[in-house]
Amino acid sequence: MQLQANGKILPYPLQKTLLMMKFTALLVLATCLQLQAKTYAQTITLNVKNSPLEFVLAQLKKQSGYQFFYKDAALRNAKPVTLEVSNRPFEEVLNLCFKDQPLNWSIVKKTVVIVEKEKDNSMVRVDTVPQSQATGVPQTVSGTLLENTGKPIHDAAVALATATQSDIRYTRTNEQGVFSFSEVPPGSYIIVVTHVTYNRVDRKIKVTNAPVSVHISMAPFTDEQKEVEVVMNNGYQSKSKATQTGAANVITAKEIEASPSTNIMERLEGKEPGVLFDLRNNRIQIRGTNGLSATTGLVAPLVVIDGFPAIDQNLTNIPSASVDKGNPLTGKVIPATGNAILSTINPNDIESITFLKDAAAAAIWGSMAANGVIVIETKRGRRGMPQVNLNTTWSVSNPANFKNLKTMSGAEYIDLEKELFNLNMYADPITSWKSQEVSDAINTMFRASRGEITSAQRDSMLDVLGNRNNHGQIKNYLLQRAVTQQYNLSLSGGGDNSTYYLSGNYTRNVPVYKSNVNQNYYITSNTTNDFFKRRLTIGTNLNYTYAQSQINTAAINAMSVGNTGLRPYEMLVDDNGVPIQRSIDFTKSVTDSFTRMGYLPWTYNPIDELKYNNFIDTKSTVRMRLSGKGVLTDWLTVEVSGQLQRSNDQQDNLQNKDSYLTRETLNMATTYNTTTKKLVYGIPLGGIYQLSNIRGEDYGLRGQFNINKSFKEHHLNVIAGSEIRQSKVTGTQQTMYGYDDDLGTSVVVNPGVAYNVLTGGTNTLHNFDNGIYRSIRRYLSYYGMLDYGWKNKYFISGSLRYDDANIVGVDRRHRAQPLWSVGSRWNVSSEPFMQNTYPLNRLSLRATYGVGGNAPNGGQNYTTVNIGLTDPYTLLPYTSIGAAANPMLGWETTKTANFGVDAGFFNERISLTVDVYKKLTENILYSIPVNATYGVTFLQLNAASLKSHGVEVSLTAVPVKTQNWRWSTNFNFAFNTNKVTDNRFPNNTGSIAPNMIYNNYPNDNVWAYAWAGLDSVGQTQVFDSTGKKLNSTAGNTSKKQMKYMGRSTPPYFGGFTNTIQYKNFTLTARITYYLGYVVRKIDINSGYPNSNGVLSGMLDNSEALAHRWRQAGDEATAKVPGIAHINFNSLDWYKSADFNVLNAGNIRFQQLTLGYSLPQTVIKKINAFKSITANATISNLGIIWRANKEGIDPDYANTSNFTNLPPSVNYTFNLNFSF
Amino acid sequence: MKQLLYTISALAIFATTACRKYVEISPVNVRELKYTKDYQGLLYNSFQLTEKNYLYPVYASDEVWTADGAVWQNNLNINAGYAYCWLPKIWSETQEDQDWASQYTLIYNTNIIVNEVMSSEGGTDADKIKAYSEALVHRAYAYYTLVNMYAKQYDPATATTDPGVPVVLQANFTSSLKRVTVAGVYDQIINDLQTALPNLSPTPEVITNPSKAAVYAILSRVYLNQRDFIKAGSYADSALQLKNTLVDLNAYATNPTAYPAKLNDPENIFSKTVNGFLTGVPLSNDLVNLFDQTNDLRYTLFTKAGADIPASNFTNRGYYKHRLVNQGIYVGPKVPEMMLIKAECEARAGNTSSSVAILNALRRKRFTTAGYTDLTATDPQQALQLVITERRKELMGTGARWFDQRRLQKDNGFISTVNRLFKGVTYTLAPGSNEYTFAIADKYILLNPEIEQNPR
């Protein structure tokens, strides 16, 4: 504990050297084009005696700059190498090293891929040529090597081997692509040509008594061939996908880069079967939910960055804006900042994202693993020449189309106001100076009723108003084109004993709402250093993120229900373009007279407010990781790693002295002293500045042993370790009055002192400012994982983890629980009987079972108490009950069984992965409604169990592959469904409550009332369980007939991506689909007149309201309840009526990308670059097909709210330079 | 080299094979209830918990009124409108009854204290007994509120059979919620109060905390409702012996906003407030006409024309006292109420002159010095009538009238039928009507069917 107490972190071991090499090799495979090996030493000098092959390879790597890529298992039978060569070609030396090895090698781009001979069915071998050696005169064998385009290929390695491979000679092609071997005795030979960017070519030749001349043409290297080995990282270790028992998949940097959206969710949507990216709600869900409530259940997967859980578990981080009251830690999300707020991770830094889906893959994360794990690895440097990468992205989209907005016209809105006026819902504002201002239309009506104007004048004035439409002005003055710019510069490379990766990123995102902007800066530095002949490797990761968002809600407020909302006929500016100043709190004449008395101006216009009312969220995160890895013996390594994360989220809510809120607050606190004839200010003049600060401090410390041992045909890989982690959050809040923005000063006020209020009486500021919010979480874990493979065919795995955490009031017995998994894999295609099964070239079967958990975070064994609070009046320190005791509290556990098949056909032209799983989650913590008579309304109980099952299919194919053309396609499909299994939740409540669960129904059930029409006063009726019509005011307890409508999350979803390549052009189209779910159409907003007893400001102006019941007889056609007799049930029943539930199935065209990379011939002329690529992307192309007939986009079903409109088409341009 | 690596590994193992103590720390800000001050702290949560009392009796009482079609009526919150019209039910089956829930939440908190504080850590015995006793008083007050809202008015003849309210004395979530009889609930209240009484200080440290004076005052109310006028009077007297300061309204006649706030109000005995913020309470013409509108300072200071009350939406006279300091409507026992109870008991005991003397002592502080005249009564019945009238004026706007309307039905001639016109429909509340007892929200009966509904 001392280590943690003085704030130091122990070094963390990196992967063992080999893994590191594999990792960097993967990097090579994954990152963009790396051309030309010319700059590296192409001759090797080596002098080794009985050295392990591994060591020799390391030497070769150092000298050649080539990467080596192989599985540890492959080298276990390697023989020691004794060799003395000087200045020999690289390929020749390789051949010498591998001469007697049970291994084959081939060069794939800049990587030497090593595979076992008996397994090598995916690669071309140097075939044995029948023995036909003859004697005769040696001849010259020469040839030219051309690209299919006719361009000569230089610097290709050419080997001429005898049939027995007893004699192999090497040469290289010259600038003209010509090579030649002299003095070749007659016989059968094979010519093997390899090149870093072309496919290897083997050509058999026969030398007789004449010189041989051959023309060889080579095809450029294409994608599907290089993916020989995929390595995935589960946060604790890297494993080859080919030996993995669990359901896991990795998305590489290349795939992420292929869709250059600035939002990481958009990049990933539809790519990974079974992973639902909910762009609308910023949620990620792996294999459905394990919680009970569809919205509040613990559904989020764990996010791991570089081996440790991220301090911020949101991939997409939206700043909160609830600084104004209460606990700053419980912020609410506001939509003002638009759709593309980036995460705390620079997407360009991501090396790979691994999705761990089933128990065997994820169980190593124990109590945090039940919902799946997302492991993000950031990029690291690789040995070799420095590489510089510059990437710029620019994207633009227009505001959503107002035509999609289903709102009332000005005339319809006035008609609604007329009805309310006639119902005497408004008080005439002239009766008192304290009256609130009413709308222009209502004012006109009052003027007519007072006799100031005739009814004809009134009608013509209302007609003028009704013909106005402010959409155009809102668009011009409050909205703008959304623009995102992103610049990324990275530098990577490495020497003999070190690697580095440095990157910087700047992103600026301007959403459609004016006066909003979001800027992010990212700096990353990842290094590795080897010491003591690579027995010790020290790695460091440093990452700094700074994100600043300016949020101004004036534009959104102008389009929302409430006092600052604009009625459809209320314009922003007059005919001369001058902003129209409206009064809100009092009538215009009253506020004008106050202003004349010296009060601050008391009118509101959203355009002005764009300047004055700003909420700024500044978040910075530092992540530091230090790791050390030591090689103890050739099979045992030890790793120690520590990670420190600090985040600081500062929210500044500066209500400038000119902002309406401040002017209103100050004016209300200002009174006129009749004696002194002066204004008395209750609150100091100046801005109101609220500051809140949330600091997060996380550290983790891990020690781990790795055993990697092969003996004969057995291979054993074991990790075992323990870790501790602490996560601490502190939050404070402060309000300053009389703030002067220029001087940065404020006036000290005593919030307890009463001041006189303009409208009479006194008030106090009594801030809720004085608290410090803190929380500490600590975790202690022991874990182990074992993988055993036999003959590279049979694999079994097992994991065990024990987690403990400081959960208040919970006994250790309940607090900590061992979680485990077992898995097996059979690489069927490695069996001898599977050798001639063309077109099937790869087949493996996987089966796993395990238990993951969720720590019981919500409930307590004992009653907990919140402390450190102060009563605003008595100023006494008080406490409050945090959570009621639940003596039956236990863990949530999820048991998962998974069966998977991986197959490849036609030499990987088609590959298929299918996973089938079943899950059982037990003891789910759920807030069960409790009779308030017991003193609480909800109680967290380990309430129920949930069964779910699903299927995931991923199919990738390359139907066309020619010289210039390549068409690849990926289709993925996921199905997931669940069912609550607990008879404590019978379906007999008879009324719909939000988030209610029922036995034998999915947790995200959607129910509706059987609508029975409107009654004679225009109020909703529903059928009761006996089929009788129920009146909304009956207030009886008879059960209503409830219809099960379906699920609210899509059980079927996936993506369909097609990529067509022609020469240097790439066109990618991505389609996503979500099927089999329903959505409730919300066509009446909360501002329905009189639903909450307040009638002020802009009312609900949903189009549906125009079709409301107005008079007897309307019930024959109308569905929307009338206003005159409205009541709670009537409105509630309408919203929950069966006809308001829509089938939400939809297919969307999400993205179309056209990419172009400059041909090498051009690049060469420019000379400065290694590659230049450009991309243009169109996203949000819209719905292709929808199941509902009303033409509603189901994900944006609240059609009367601008913030809920489907995003408009987005255009993104991306340029990438490599030096 | 090897040694170094072994050292590192040893360190790694040592560092992370941490003892279980590592995770056995309490998170900051939240812990299990443990120390005496944690329990006492629950009682200091006055703003959010202990002060909250009732809301809907305010709407239901006959002193609240506007003409039909007034904007106030049309804009009334749906549930408040139901209470205003004495509809058989106020809450739909998915809604919580805020009044019921707030009182039972307080009961849940006090149950925790009553059952656990004596075995808590870190406090002296005196601290523990203080918290224990204060919790009992709050619990008793909550049950007093509930039994007078949701059960029939106490009637000595039927109290042992009339259903009261569920009595929950343990903080658990499984016990039966069968309604205890009215007498049973009253016994529980008196028992709690008597248990607490000896251990409380005579007057409170802050007005939101219970004291001996508070207990006497509550007991006085309890016995008044039980029609035990001797005890009611005697407890009112005991309360007044501990606290009897009255505000002379003349001091604020020209400067009403200087009226003392909650904590400094010398008339407050035990602070409880209306459960919610009311912008304005429109007063019935009957009540308004009871006032001497020129000389009664209660009228000039504590009421205002609706048009002058911000966001009030009515034009008739409205209650304004709570807007002077904007800290809510006080409904807890106060010195004037104790004087009125004492006066009522004196009148009921036949002591006409002493009854009227108490009334005049109060009224002297309520009228302009110039406009004040003593009341006189010739017989106890007349004195009683004067007391009840004075109660209406002194306790206006607080909902106290609703409980008087229930209570005074046992006396002939005090309560008559009330009519209300709401959105064109006339609603009637006749003496003896079932609607004098609020319905228990359907939600609670659906969750616990053993709760019996009041006759509707």
Image: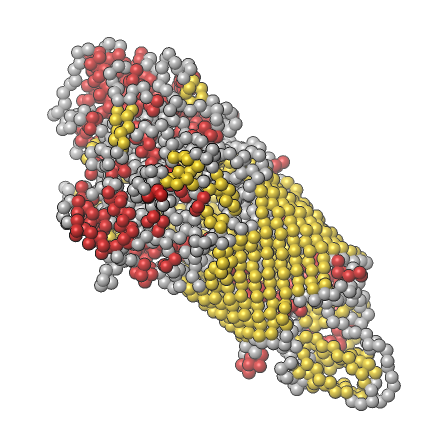
Viewer-closest of B93 and A813: B93
Name the quarter where the N terminus of chain A is drawn.
Answer: top right
Residue B105 is situated, as x and y percent measured from the top left of the image, at 43, 30
Q: In which quadrant will I find the C terminus of chain A? A: bottom right
Residue under the point 24% across and 53% down: A582
Q: Is residue A407 above or below residue A137?
A: above
Whether residue A806 sits left or right of residue A169 in the image: it is left
Left or right of A1184 on screen, residue A764 = left
Residue farthest right in this picture? A135
Count of number-bearing discs = 0
Look at the image and tell me whether residue A1104 can be seen.
yes
Colour convention of the picture: secondary structure
Residue nearest the viewer, comparing A30 with B7: A30
Q: In the displayed structure, does residue B161 sit left or right of residue A88?
A: left
Name the residue rendered at 80%, 88% in the picture.
Answer: A139
Task: Kindly identify the residue that appears in the image at 66 percent across and 62 percent down.
Answer: A911
What residue do we see at 61% from left, 76% from top? A964
Classify residue A933 by image quadrant.
Answer: top left
Residue A844 location, quadrant:
bottom right
- Nearer to us in this view, A954 or B395: A954
Vertically, is A1106 above or below A257?
above
Residue A1037 position in % (x across, y down): 43, 30
